[in-house]
Image: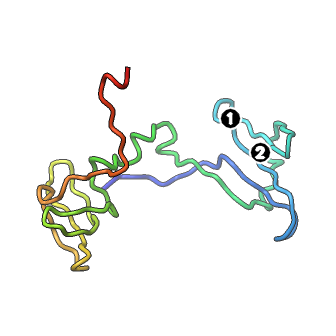
Amino acid sequence: MLNIEAKYDLHGIVNHYGSLGFGHYISFTKNPFDNKWYKYDDVNKEEIPEEKIHKESAYLLFYIRKDIAEKSLMDVLPNIETDYFPGKPIKTKKGGEGFVVKPSKKDDKILGVKMKSDITESSMKVADLKDEEDQHEIQYTISEMK
């Protein structure tokens, strides 16, 4: 299992002023390069101290998780083509369909799965799974890419 510390930094706020049927939106964002807050109101942009942000009127809040702030998406998200993660759809070589419940560790070749035909959790060897086929995938030859 992943060892993740879930602590967040606030990086954006959208405020709504008015009623459900009518109103005005103003956003506040923290610039990641200068760490200053900016207020965006229609076409106007101005630097604003964090203390002056109307947090009481927050409609949407945007956070960045501290432990992944400096990482790329490739380091954070699973590779949908090669990794087995909870919820990933699978097909067996015998025609069964289901999804992964417990992923395998890198050395482990056994998955916890639930199949459509039997909703109880069971174990399955990765070798018993059918290779994925993307019906919408476009493949190019090397000569076509030049």
- Percent x, y for residue 130? 18, 57
Q: Which mark is residue 35?
A: 1
Q: Residue 50 carries which label?
A: 2
Mark 1–mark 2 Cα distance, whole angstroms, equals 11 Å
Amino acid at the residue labelled 2: Glu
**Res 33 → quadrant:** top right
Closer to the N terminus: mark 1 or mark 2? Answer: 1
Secondary structure, mark 2, is helix
Secondary structure, mark 1, is loop
- Percent x, y for residue 6? 48, 55
Q: Is residue 31 placed above or below 61 in the rendered structure? A: above
The quarter of the picture where the N terminus appears is bottom left
Q: Which residue is drawn at 64% across and 49% down?
A: 10
In the rendered view, does 67 fall on the left or right side of 85? Answer: right
Amino acid at the residue labelled 1: Asn
Protein image colouring: rainbow
In the rendered view, does 112 fall on the left or right side of 29? Answer: left
Q: Which residue is drawn at 72% across and 44% down?
A: 29
The quarter of the picture where the C terminus appears is top left
Q: Residue at x 76, y 47 (%)?
A: 28
- Percent x, y for residue 48? 82, 40
- Percent x, y for residue 136? 37, 49
- Badge 2 crowding class, 10 Å Cα cut-off, few under 14, some 14 to 19, many 20 or more, is some
Q: Residue at x 86, y 40 (%)?
A: 43
